[in-house]
């Protein structure tokens, strides 16, 4: 078995902190939308009670949405790829944190192609893309994928 890790491979097993880190950009965007809504309400002369209610509901919704979208981002971010004979498995950050395993997929059905900077292949009914800057051993991964075409 041969495995390769991406730059997204978690250095910590603290799932809460990793989820918060992956949600930072989402939180920032939602906070900007919330602040804009509050400014519009202030300019239009809404009462302090309405502003406070809008703010509290908005913050709670932003946190819930940010956490949910952060979890989706962790689930869709590949952290490790395993090659075992004529099969391979792509493991997400979320799967590593939950100590889950992925079913192996036959290399012959991956239909891998590369342009030198990105590698695209089929994996369980999805088209996946790996970027060179995310994988230290990108060329070796490409060789394994091309060898599986056999």
Image (tube, grey):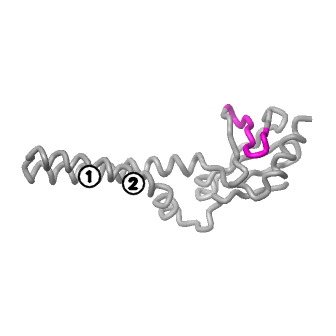
Element class at badge 2: helix
Q: Which mark, by number, is residue 27?
A: 2
- Please provide percent x and percent y for residue 26: 43, 51
Q: Which quarter of the image is occupied by the C terminus? A: top right
Q: Which mark, by number, is residue 96?
A: none
Pointer 1: residues within 10 angstroms few (<14), some, or many (20+)? few
Q: Is residue 14 above or below residue 143?
A: below
Question: In the drawing, does residue 26 fall left or right of residue 125?
Answer: left
- Measure the alpha-carbon separation of dots 2 and 1: 12 Å
Comparing 123 with 23, the one in front is 23
Q: Are marks 2 and 1 in contact (CB under 8 Å)?
A: no
Comparing 48 with 2, the one in front is 48
Q: Looking at the image, which residue is at 21% across and 52% down?
A: 55
Q: Residue furthest right?
A: 150
Q: Which residues are magenta?
A: 114-125
Q: Is residue 94 magenta?
A: no
Q: Is residue 62 above or below residue 20?
A: above
- Please provide percent x and percent y for residue 67: 42, 52
- Please provide percent x and percent y for residue 17: 49, 64
First in sequence: mark 2 vs mark 1: 2
Which residue position holds label 1?
35
Question: In the drawing, does residue 90 fall left or right of residue 36?
Answer: right
């Amino acid at each position: 078995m041969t495995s390769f890790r991406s730059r997204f491979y978690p250095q910590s097993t603290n799932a809460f902190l990793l989820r918060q880190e992956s949600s930072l950009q989402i939180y920032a965007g939602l906070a900007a939308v919330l602040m804009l809504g509050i400014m519009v309400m202030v300019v239009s002369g809404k009462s302090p009670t309405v502003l406070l209610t809008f703010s509290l509901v908005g913050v709670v919704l932003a946190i819930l949405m940010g956490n949910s979208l952060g979890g989706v981002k962790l689930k869709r971010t590949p952290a490790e790829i395993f090659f075992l004979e004529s099969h391979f498995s792509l493991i997400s950050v979320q799967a590593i944190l939950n100590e889950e395993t992925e079913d192996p997929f036959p290399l012959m059905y991956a239909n891998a192609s590369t342009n030198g900077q990105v590698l695209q292949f089929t994996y369980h009914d999805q088209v996946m893309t790996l970027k060179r800057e995310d994988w230290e051993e990108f060329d070796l991964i490409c060789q394994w994928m091309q060898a599986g075409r056999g």
